[in-house]
Amino acid sequence: MLEGNLYDGSCQVVTALNLLSGRWKLPILWKLSKGGIRYNELKRQVRGITNIMLTRSLQELEAHGLVERIQYEENPPHVEYCLSEAGRELIPALRELIKWARNTPHMTEQQK
Amino acid sequence: MLEGNLYDGSCQVVTALNLLSGRWKLPILWKLSKGGIRYNELKRQVRGITNIMLTRSLQELEAHGLVERIQYEENPPHVEYCLSEAGRELIPALRELIKWARNTPHMTEQQK
DNA sequence: CCGCATCCATGCGGATACTG
DNA sequence: CAGTATCCGCATGGATGCGG
């Protein structure tokens, strides 16, 4: 896995990582990892996010199969978001990254 | 040093992940994980990268403590780059991400 | 051999306002 | 409640050429 043609391997990881980059994706995924949640509740919990950014992020994550959108045909509208199987499988990798970030001085210092 | 850090980290993981995002950082780190390497050799191995992008990426990675630059006072010039301790500690997390990316259909299909 | 300076294009993150 | 529609600034990626 580490060996062999590295560039091929890197491509997918680069794609994956760029999918997750940006200011909001991880916080969103994190909230979703706790279970299904509605749009406005999610917006409340992800501090500072606006409608447009929440909508876009969710759409992207859904388009790439990390998040599932479930719409209940009710009035008033009721939509829930949750992690897909792929999304759930991603969590362990993120946990590793979190662990690393916490134990890395430069990461904790340079919060300018 | 390069200015304009995109998002200050209200979250360390977000900061960490954004540090790694972009087209070249991971391929570079990947090559470096094999051991120290010279600038031009690195440029040869990271297909398609230009001087400016290689230089910038290395500077950023160095500024954030993931990469170390070693300059030998010789003529002709001799510079080597290698992973720092923090950089080496990051590899396991990346391995997880690679594993995930490889096992995720959408990642392998949708190279947009 | 190992870079930096300059300039340019693009896309992303975001503010504001509106809708079914 | 759950979103869209516009518009915009600026960081980021990149081509090309120069310099120690």
Image: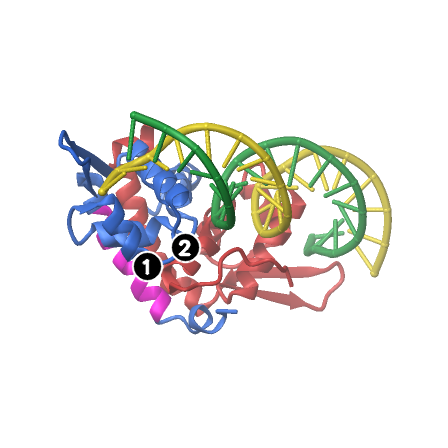
Chain colours: A blue, B red, C green, D yellow
Between the C-alphas of marks 1 and 2, the distance is 8 Å
Q: Is residue B44 above or below residue A49?
A: above
Which segment did they paint magenta?
A: A89-102
Locate the N terminus of chain A and report the quarter of the image it occupies: top left
Mark 1 falls on what kind of element?
Answer: helix
Residue B87 image-quadrant placement: bottom left
Q: Position of residue A32 (x, y in %)?
A: 22, 49
Judge the density around disc 2: few (<14), some (14-19), many (≥20) Cα neighbours within 10 Å: many
Amino acid tagged 1: Leu
Q: Nearer the viewer, residue B36 or B85?
A: B85
The residue under the point 36% across, 57% down is: B91
Chain that bears disc 1: A
Q: Which mark is residue A97?
A: 1
Q: Quadrant of residue B16?
A: bottom left
Q: Report the number of discs.
A: 2
Q: Which x, y percent locates residue B78?
A: 67, 60
Mark 1–mark 2 CB contact (< 8 Å): yes
Q: Nearer the viewer, residue A45 or A22?
A: A45
Residue B71 within the segment the image draws in magenta: no
Is B44 left, or right, of A35 in this rendering? right
Q: Is residue A3 visible?
A: yes
Task: From the viewer's perspective, tell me whether residue B106 is left or right of residue C18.
Answer: left
Which kind of residue does numbered mark 2 sit on?
Answer: Leu
Q: Residue at x 36, y 42 (%)?
A: A57
Q: Counting other residues with Cα less than 10 Å from the Cα at mark 1, is it few (<14), some (14-19), or many (20 or more)?
A: many
Residue denoted by label 2: B17
Q: Residue at x 38, y 52 (%)?
A: A49
Q: Residue at x 34, y 47 (%)?
A: A2
Q: Main secondary structure of the magenta part?
A: helix
